[in-house]
Image: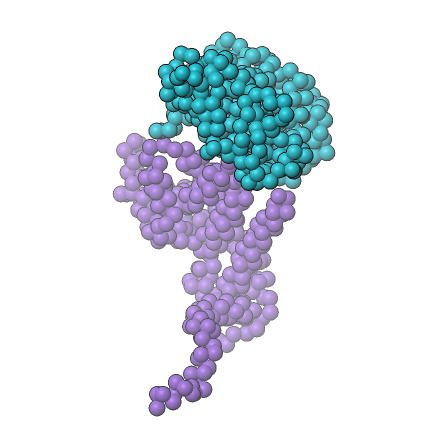
Amino acid sequence: MATLHLEGLVKRYGQISALNGVDLEVGDGEFFALLGPSAAGKTTTLRAIAGLEKLDAGRIYLDGEDITEVPVRRRNMAMVFQSFALYPHLSTYNNLAYPLREAGLSRREIAKRVQEAAELLRIKHTLKRKPASLSGGEQQRLAIGRAIIRQPRLFLLDEPLTNLDAKLRHAMRAEFKRLHRELGATMIFATPDQLEALSMGQRIAILRDGQIVQTGTADELYLGPCDEFVAQLVGDPPMNLVAGTLRRDARGARLELPFAAIDTAALHNRLESFQPGTEFLLGIRPHDLRLAGDDRRGLMFNAKIRLAEPQGDITILDLEANGAALRLVVAEIEGAKRNPGETIGLAFEPARTRLFMKESGLALG
Amino acid sequence: MSAIATTKPNIIERFFARHRGPLLVSPAILVLVAMNIFPLFWSFGLSFYKYRANRQAEPVFVWFDNYIKILSDPVVWSRFQTTAIFVAVSVLLQLIVGFLLAVLFEKQFPGRRVLLMLVLTPMMLSFVAVGAFFRYYYEPTFGLLSQAIKAITGEPFIVLQSPIGAIGAIIFADVWMWSPFVMLLVLAGLVSVPKHLYEAAEIDRVSWWRRFRTITFPYIRGLLLLAVLFRTIETFKLFDAVFLITEGGPGTSTETIAVYVYRVAFQYFRTSESAALGYILLFVVVVLTNLYLFFVQRRAKET
C-alpha cells in the first residue's frame, strides 16, 4: 500500500532521451495504467520506479519519502517483466519461493505461502515443473505469483499481457482486476493496448515521446481527449478527424467541412474567439456517427462506402465523404445490407464532437 | 590423337574421373595411416612382446607380462601419485584463477580489451617457450624469482631445490599458462546469462551468493565441466613443463607418468613395456572422456 509521486523524470541514452520530464501521481491502492505506443517510455518509467534505471534528473517519492537514490532491493517493490524473467533452472515452486528465501521465514511458512499463491493463480499443478515446460498463461501467472508472494509496497507490471494470445489475454484482464481487488495493493501497469488500459486501469496516464500527455479515468480520456494524439489512441476504431475551416460572412459563422458546414451555434460557440480562416480538426467518434434515419435529427450528409470490415456482432464501414475519410460502426445486421460503392446517408450530433486546432493538435474547451 | 583421347577416355582417365573424391583425400589418409594409425596398432602389438629397441634379440610374445609387470611396479604407482598431485592441485587452481579472471572480465572497465589480450597470451605460446621461460625465471643465480627474493632476504632462493618447491614451481607455470583457457569457457557462460534475470533477482532481493548459485552457475556448469575434463586430460599427460623446468627432479619428485613413459622408452629402452604403459594411459584418458560424456548426456536429458 503506497502512494507514488514522480517529479520530472528524465532519462537519456546517449543522444536519445527516453523520458522527457515525467510527472505522475498514483494514489494508494490504485490500479494505474501507463498507455502509449512502443518507445513512448512506459518501460523506462517502470524501470525507473523500480530503481533499475539511473535517472538523469527528477525525483521519485514513495509515501512522501524520496527514494530516488534508494537501491533496488531496499525499495520493496515487485515487478512483472514483459519477458516474465522466470528463473529457467528453478521449478515453479522455487521460482515462487525465491523472493522469500532471504526474508528469514521458516521452511513451513514459505511452503504455506507458495501453496497459497499457487492456489490463487491456479498453477498448483505446475509446482514441480520448470518454466520452459509451462504454457504461456502459466508462465505469466507464475511471474505474477513471484510478485505477489511477498507483500511489496508497489506492483509494477510491464506489458503483462502482451506475450499472451488473444483469448488468454481477455481472461487475464478479468483475473488482474480480481487480483487487484483481493490484494488491495497499488499497481502500475504499462500497456500499448488502449483496450487493456481502459478496461483495467482505474486511472490512465498517456505517454508520448517520454512525456505524460494526459491523465484521467477511462471516461475522461474517451470523452475529453486533450489532443489529437490521445483522441487517436483511445477508442477503437479511433476517432474520426475531419479537417474544417472557420468561415464568417453574411450567412453567419460556420465550420466548413468537406461534406457539410456546421453552424458555430451548434458547436456551442466554441469557435467564437477565432479568426475566420482558422483551420480545425473535428473529432467524431465512430460510435457517434449513425445511419441517417427518418427522424432527420442531427447533421446529415452523404458518404460512399469504400470497405466493410465485419467483426462479428458489429461491422466497421470505411467511408469517404467528399474526400474525407470516415469510419462508422454499425450492427452486423446493418452492415450486411451494405455494399462497397454504395452511397449512404449519415448523421451526427455536432454537440457530441470534439474540436482540435489543426496546427497544434490541442483540443478546445 | 588428343581429340580421340577426349572423346573416348582410356581406362586410367575413366578411373580418375569416377573416383576423384577418394583420390583427392588419399594422400592425407596415407600420411595419417603411416604416421599415426599404423604406429598406434604396431605399438599395441608391441606391448604384448618382450622387445628392446636397442638390442638385436628377436621380439618374444609374452601375453600380458608387460602389463602385469607395470601394474605391479611400485615405481609406476608412485609416478601415478605424482601425476595425481599435479592434476588435482593444478586443475583446481586453474579453475579458481580462471573463474576469478572471468568474473573480472565480465565487467566493462577501461583497458579491458588490452588486458584481456595480455591475459590470453600464455595460452597461445609454445610449450617449449613457456618451459624455457620458467626455467630461467626459477634459475638460482640470475633468475628473476631468486633475484627478487635475494633483494629482500640477501640469500639466493633455489625454488627447485626441494620437492615441494619444484612441484609448486611446475604447477605455477601450468596454472599461468592454462587459467586463461578456463577463463574463456567460464566467460562464455557468464555472458550468456540474460540480464533481466539479474534484474529480477535484484527486485526479489536475494543475496549475491544465492543469485550466483541459482541463476549464474547453471549457465556455466556445463562449460566448467568441459574445462575440468580438458584440463584434467591435458594435465594428466603433463610432460613439457616438467621436462623443461626440472627434468623430473629433484630426484624423481616431479617425475610425472608422462615423463616416466619417456624415460622407459628412450632412456631405459624398455620399448615394449613403455608401449604397454602408454596404453594404460590411453585407457585412463578414455575412461575420463566417457565419464564426461555421461555427465553431459545426463544433463541434456534433464533440460
Q: Residue at x 72, y 34 (%)?
A: A125
Q: Residue at x 34, y 29 (%)?
A: A15
Tell me how the rendering is colored: by chain
Q: Identify the image quadrant of the C terminus of chain B.
A: top right
Residue sitting nearer the eye, B92 or B140: B92
Q: Residue at x 50, y 19 (%)?
A: A354
Residue sitting nearer the eye, B71 or B279: B279
Residue A245 visible to an observer of this rendering: yes
**Colour-to-chain, purple:** B
Residue sitting nearer the eye, A155 or A33: A33
Q: In this picture, is A217 found above or below B268? A: above
Residue furthest out toward the bottom: B1
Q: What colour is chain A? A: cyan
The answer to which quarter of the image holds residue A130 is top right
Residue A146 visible to an observer of this rendering: no
Q: Identify the image quadrant of the N terminus of chain B.
A: bottom left
